[in-house]
Image (cartoon, rainbow, N blue to C red):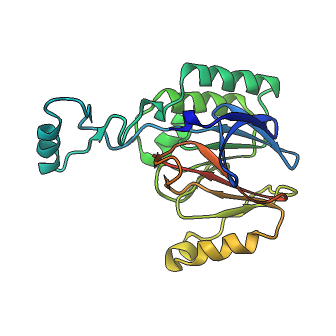
């Protein structure tokens, strides 16, 4: 789990260095990158636990799994495919509010995995249910001044209200010197050309800016799926900011 990695300061916020080129942006932290401020708040509720969360030490565990699998049920296993830490703790919410207070509730960009409750309702027609995190992000949306919020989780590409950028199969180069308004490349470019993302990532490697992607990813380093925000550093002038999914 992420808890085993030491915590250090990085660009004004707290991080965990997973590998030399992979840095975990911790929840509720604010980072100053090339003169722009980034508020990170990872986490999201699992969509596929309607049929429950099983305990692996339950004497009837295997029998329950067979029964659920036979009917195609949607469930997860505690500490194997589901962790309660998928949502922030109360301490992390307190840290987030305290850090936003310090900057007067004004940042350039917000990086999260899910989105504010009202945005979630708008993009899903009410299919996804609100929780403590989406309600907190709704509070941030109402109180905080920011240019864009980048998020994933909902497995599509869409811009809502001009500033909430939902990403699944897109990679966006963010020019930090002049990044407003943001111009999104057509989704079709990525759907029709499976090598496009790699080409764009390479073309950005020599530039100054940030490369955002919110695609689901399994962490081979930690051995589990992770909701946290991560930064993969390509060089001293380029930051690739990734958010990874449980």
- The spot of residue 21 in percent (x, y) is 69, 55
Position of 216 relative to 37 (above/below): below
Q: Residue at (46%, 47%) from the top-left corner?
A: 225
> Residue 136 appears at what percent x and percent y?
58, 28
Name the one closer to the observer, 172 or 86.
Answer: 86
Query: Picture quarter containing residue 236?
Result: bottom right
Marker count (numbered):
0
Q: Nearer the viewer, residue 135 or 6?
A: 6
Residue drawn at x 86%, y 50% as measured from the top left: 34
Q: Where's residue 121, x and y in %?
A: 47, 40
Residue 145 seen: no
Q: Is residue 211 depicted above or below 2 in this figure? A: below
- Of 40 and 149, the residue lying toward us: 40
Q: Specify the quadrant of the image occupied by residue 12.
A: top right
Residue 129 visible somewhere in the drawing:
yes
Q: In which quarter of the image is residue 62?
A: top left
Q: Going 59% across and 64% down the picture, which residue do you hit?
A: 170
Q: Which residue is drawn at 37% across and 43% down?
A: 47
| Vertical order, 192 against 221 (above or below) | below
Image-based side of 103 in relation to 168, left or right = right
State the image coordinates of residue 232 (x, y, percent, origin top left): 68, 55
């Amino acid at each position: 789990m992420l808890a085993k990695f030491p915590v250090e300061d990085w660009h004004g916020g707290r991080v965990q260095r997973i590998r030399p080129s992979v840095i975990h942006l911790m929840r509720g932290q604010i980072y100053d990158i090339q003169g722009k401020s980034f508020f990170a708040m990872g986490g999201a509720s699992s969509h596929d636990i309607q049929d429950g969360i099983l305990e692996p030490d339950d004497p009837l565990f295997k029998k329950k799994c067979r029964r659920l699998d036979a009917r195609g049920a949607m469930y997860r296993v505690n500490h194997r495919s589901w962790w309660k830490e998928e949502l922030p703790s109360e301490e992390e919410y307190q840290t987030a509010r305290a850090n936003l207070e310090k900057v007067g509730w004004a940042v350039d960009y917000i990086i999260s995995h899910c989105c504010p409750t009202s945005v979630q309702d708008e993009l899903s027609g009410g299919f996804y249910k609100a929780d403590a995190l989406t309600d907190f992000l709704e509070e941030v949306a109402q109180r905080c001044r920011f240019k864009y919020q980048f998020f994933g989780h909902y497995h599509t590409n869409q811009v809502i209200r001009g500033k909430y950028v939902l990403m699944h199969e897109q990679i966006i180069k963010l020019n930090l010197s002049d990044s407003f308004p943001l111009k999104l490349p057509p989704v079709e470019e990525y759907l029709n050309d499976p090598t496009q993302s790699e080409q764009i990532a390479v073309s950005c490697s020599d530039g100054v800016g940030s490369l955002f992607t919110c695609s689901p990813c399994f962490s081979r380093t930690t051995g589990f799926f992770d909701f946290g925000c991560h930064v993969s550093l390509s060089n001293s002038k380029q930051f690739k900011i990734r958010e990874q999914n449980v």
